[in-house]
Amino acid sequence: MIAPPQTSPDISLQEKGKLDRYRWTILSLIFFATTINYLDRQVISLLKDDYLAPMFHWSETDYSNIVVVFQVLYAVGMLGVGWVIDKVGTKVGYALSLAVWSIAAIFHSAARTTLGFMAARGVLGISEAGNFPAAIKTVAEWFPKKERALATGLFNSGSNIGAIIAPLTVPLIALAWGWQWAFIITGSIGLLWLIFWLAIYEIPLKHKKLSVSELTYINSDKESIAENSTPQEKISWFTLLTFRQTWAYFIGKFLTDPVWWFYLFWLPSFLNKQYHMTKTDLALPIALVYTMTTFGSIFGGWLSGYFMKKGWPVYKARMTAMLIFALCVIPIVFAQYLGQFNPWYAILIVGLAASAHQAWSANIFTTASDMFPRKAVASVTGIGGMAGAVGGIIIAKSAGFLLDYYKSLGNINTGYFVMFIVCGSAYLLAWIIFNILAPKMKQVNFN
């Protein structure tokens, strides 16, 4: 292993201007992987009404069972895949995850029964869980702390791009060549990505195309220098769960990730029930919301990095940014009221809340690498991802029960109002608990 150059952690602006930018090439790879991740998971929902449900005689219960299988195994995968990635390394772990989920996506085309789709969906869920642990670990390996939130926001914006691309392409593919080809083509894109990943990726210390100046910059945090000089033994989940920092991350993800799932699954229904928007009417509002979230994701990562460049400590920069975004979600409570005057007011407020979520995510993801050494980052990210997925299952079931209850009373809009109160308060509660459990985000030391 090549030891990093022993230079001062502080690099002048003049020296920084001379740095190479190869780390951004690596970031582009995980951006496209995240885009593919969200593209593959959305195909079934876009084909459901016009192709799959009529052909396979699905009831809403059949479809919900398929969705739940994905969510449950995604949660299980989040816990296990992170540990595997920490054990085998980012290059092999990411490649395995994406190869399996691409093949699972393609094999949806061979399913001929509800059980067959559940099986394909389950494999897709457990393998897609590897994306975020691997991506966060990659960012921790290739970026210093002051750039990690921005890098995370940039690659995480791929989820929004995937959410926009899918409805624009999947129906056209199905119309031109049949629904099977929608699964085959989108799944094959991941296999193409795999070629570039295996050819380009390596950890910085072993990468032949990385300049000495950029390697020095990547390892400019004092913790990075220490990590590179010590053996990278693997850390068990049980050990990780003994740290308050793990539980801070766990609870933060458990409380806030479900809000994103709620927006994904119920935004079209809300606009339909509240404002009587048809399938055609929904295209522009949903595209606007996801476009806003793309900017939110990038801005969220930039803001905490900006604070650090002003000399703020990591903890203060990260927590200040997260508090700002937690407050930006609160107006979601007023979406229905303002929507009475014009539906676009409600759409813009939902877009603001969804953007704030992605900005929050760019920062809370990065706290895993702020508080834990690189050898444990994927495992901690997986634990938090599992918590978020479980929270997503809970909010899906809760929202379904609540909305059905108020629908039976002839007032479903009250159900949405209650859900918006939950969404609006989740981030501030998560921020408070995070600060109680991990004051000043103290670095975990396993020695």
Image (tube, grey):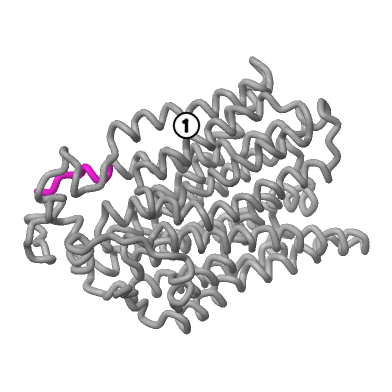
Please state the horizontal and vertical placement of residue 334, each as a whole percent of the image: 66, 67
Residue sitting at 69 percent across and 58 percent down?
393
Residue type at mark 1 is Gly
SS class, disc 1: helix
Q: List the residue tagged with mark 1.
A: 190
| Quarter of the figure with residue 370 | bottom left
Residue sitting at 37 percent across and 70 percent down?
318
| Quarter of the figure with residue 406 | bottom right
Residue sitting at 51 percent across and 45 percent down?
160
| Quarter of the figure with residue 364 | bottom left
Q: Is residue 310 left or right of residue 29?
A: left
Q: Which residues are magenta?
A: 18-24
Q: Is residue 249 left or right of residue 344?
A: left
Q: Nearer the viewer, residue 123 or 263?
A: 123
Judge whether residue 316 can be spotted in this image: no
Please state the horizontal and vertical placement of residue 148, each as a whole percent of the image: 32, 58
- Mark 1 neighbour density, 10 Å: few (under 14) some (14–19) many (20 or more): many
Residue sitting at 47 percent across and 47 percent down?
131
Q: Nearer the viewer, residue 327 or 93?
A: 93
Please state the horizontal and vertical placement of residue 162, each as a whole percent of the image: 52, 39
25 is higher (above) or lower (below) than 113 = below
